[in-house]
Amino acid sequence: EIDVFRKTDLFSNLYNAFLEASVVGTAIIGMQYDAQKKIDFIPLTIGQYYLSEGPNGFIDTCYRIFSMSAGQMLEQFGRENLPERVLNALNNDNEDQLFNVIQAVEPNKEYLSHWVNAFNKPYISAYFLENSNDDDKFLEYKGLSYFPFLVARWDRDLSSAYGGGIGETIS
């Protein structure tokens, strides 16, 4: 229903996505639910993400890197899921300290359509800190029923997951 989208920032993000797709060839908008179960749209720009497509030519994998403060991670992932270096920042009253976070979304190779549970979904989403070591745990690891990114390619290049835009022809 269109009213769902009117309560979001989708339309302003679509405008920016159209501009980016036309110039650099690829645009991407992430989708997630916030605490009030409202859909949030997150525009990404070139250099913040890495894409791959499945055998059908559709994008089915996205890795994105972005910064989050210790306070934001506490709110989104919960204290029990934070690694020691983030907890140290929080314990030292440094909620604004920034950390690079990576979200990886890819097809669940172990997906079984007849078996229903929280992890057995068509996609897996994992959040973790950049430069994590073996002692760090995932900030979040869960199954998703849908691919949480809208991806547009202006001029699809069949040899690449990325599209081409008019910016390629300007020298």
Image (cartoon, rainbow, N blue to C red):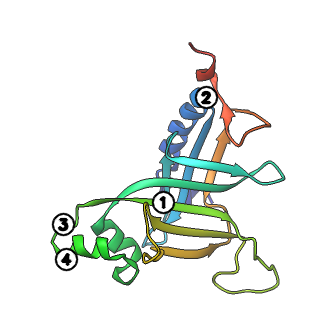
Which residue position holds label 4?
Answer: 91
Which residue position holds label 1?
Answer: 102
Between disc 4 and disc 2, whose residue precedes? Answer: 2
CA gap between label 3 and label 1 equals: 21 Å
Mark 3 neighbour class, 10 Å CA radius: few under 14, some 14 to 19, many 20 or more:
some
Q: Amino acid at mark 3?
A: Asn
Between disc 1 and disc 2, whose residue precedes? Answer: 2
Q: Amino acid at mark 1?
A: Ile
Say if 70 sits above or below 51 in the image: below
Q: Position of residue 52 (x, y in %)?
A: 69, 50
Secondary structure at badge 3 equals loop
CA gap between label 1 and label 2 equals: 26 Å
Q: In the figure, is residue 76 to the left or right of 22?
A: left
Between disc 4 and disc 1, whose residue precedes? Answer: 4
Between disc 2 and disc 3, whose residue precedes? Answer: 2
Q: Amino acid at mark 4?
A: Asn
Q: Position of residue 59 (x, y in %)?
A: 71, 51
CA gap between label 2 and label 3 equals: 40 Å
Q: Quadrant of the C terminus?
A: top right
Which residue position holds label 2?
Answer: 22
